[in-house]
Image (cartoon, rainbow, N blue to C red):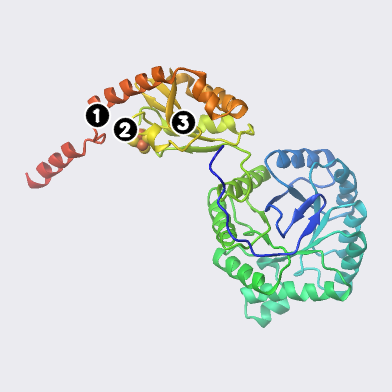
Amino acid sequence: MTSAPATFPRKATRQIHVGKVAVGGDAPISVQSMTITKTADVEGTLQQIYALAAAGCDIVRCTCNEIEAAEGLAQIVPRSPVPIIADIHHQYKMALAALEAGVHGLRLNPGNIRKPEHIKAVASEARDRKVPIRIGVNGGSLDPSLYEKYGGLTADAMVESAQMEMRYFDEVGFDLIKISVKASNVPLMVEAYRKLSAVTDHPLHLGVTEAGPLPGGLVKATAGIAALLLEGIGDTIRYSLTADPVEEARAGRQLLESLGLRERKNVDLIACPSCGRAEIDVIEVANRAQAAFADKKLPLQIAVMGCVVNGPGEAREADLGIAAGNKRGHLFVKGRNVAVVPESEMVEALVDWASFIHEHGVEAALQRVDTTIAEREAARDRNALLDEKGTDANQSAEKIVEIRRTVEG
Ligand code: SF4
């Protein structure tokens, strides 16, 4: 019901499958996240996986750092609603154990599993089981020899790390690969992915590593991931936030929806920034609306606007919205006023109308009521506010006179 998604040309990559989820080629860009429970805690981990899937996560990664974790994976994988990837560091045997547990994918860090025979043993086993591996280069744990060769962490060093790993995979005829070159420095990460994308057609997994807590982490991760997606680079994404992983999944999903790269499944809540004309506490009402729609799968754009003077017009593209005026909430559908409710019931009314539109469509919503009544009421409140505050809500003209008097007098 929202406007058609924008399209960006995407770099052509090969397609692999992580369980039932296709990655690369023309597959939709997928969202990943990682559990923060002990993987040996099967019930706790599954609970988190279900929460992540409900928040829009397509693939979930779990650490496999000990034998108990691998045993946990054997129980988690068959009960998970989404494909499971085992995250492996240092111990190649944990990769073999995870494959035995039936995982849908592995992530190997070439910076800390460096023995060629170990890498090739894992790749051979993955090849036989047709399980993909992500070569997960991380700026913070780069192979020390590359660090030395390049005189520090550089984009070229990260790309070379990935290429070295690919050569080992190639030697055993394994090519179900996706690659990441994450760094916590956004310009460095962007440069590394650009360079990597120029030399490979394997699908790329994007992320800014250790982006940190909200809101800074969100900004950094979005800056790096979005910059690349807009260039057509990237097939799957992960926000690495120091937050509940559900926030990572939500952020990933919202980014893709806002770029028009995934079909909208969730409410796109827009709200005015408020100003001197606002008739309500816009921040408070918008937060309440956000909470009310958080778990509702409604692909609608919904607006919360501070005043009926400008709100319905400024948000006329929204499927549904509400604007405040004279202690009342004026509901509008595609810019047309449809109902008037008490200010205290604004959010409830939005939820009711959103469900109606989702079920019956915009046209039916416009025919649901006699819109002339709502339009007349909105016009009345709009005019009353204009009479009261004028077109200059901030009384700029009076303030200017006052400022001059202060300065000149
Ligand atoms: S004019 Fe009205 S809709 Fe626009 S920012 Fe101010 S309160 Fe919000």
- Mark 2 CB near ligand 1 (8 Å cut): yes
Q: Is residue 76 left or right of residue 254?
A: right
Of the numbered discs in the image, which one, if any, rests on residue 81?
A: none
Element assignment for label 3: helix
Q: Which residue is mark 3?
A: 284
Is residue 2 something that shows in the picture? yes
Which x, y percent locates residue 36?
A: 73, 47
Nearer-N-terminus badge (3/1): 3
Residue type marked 1: Lys
Q: Which residue is mark 1?
A: 389
Residue type marked 2: Arg
Q: Is residue 367 above or below residue 88?
A: above
Element assignment for label 1: helix
Which x, y percent locates residue 356?
A: 58, 24
Q: Find the residue positioned furthest to the bottom.
A: 149
Label 3 Cα neighbours within 10 Å, binned few <14 / some 14-19 / many ≥20: few
Residue type marked 3: Glu
- CB within 8 Å, label 1 to label 2: yes
Of the numbered discs in the image, which one, if any, rests on residue 277?
A: 2
Q: Which residue corresponds to the image point at 16% horizontal and 36% vertical from the top-left? A: 398
Mark 3 or 1: the one toward you: 1
Q: Which residue corresponds to the image point at 58% horizontal and 49% vertical from the top-left? A: 260
Q: Nearer the viewer, residue 377 or 152?
A: 377
Element assignment for label 2: loop
Nearer-N-terminus badge (2/3): 2
Q: Nearer the viewer, residue 357 or 76?
A: 357
Nearer-N-terminus badge (1/2): 2
Q: Is residue 359 above or below residue 110?
A: above
Q: Is residue 193 left or right of residue 365?
A: right
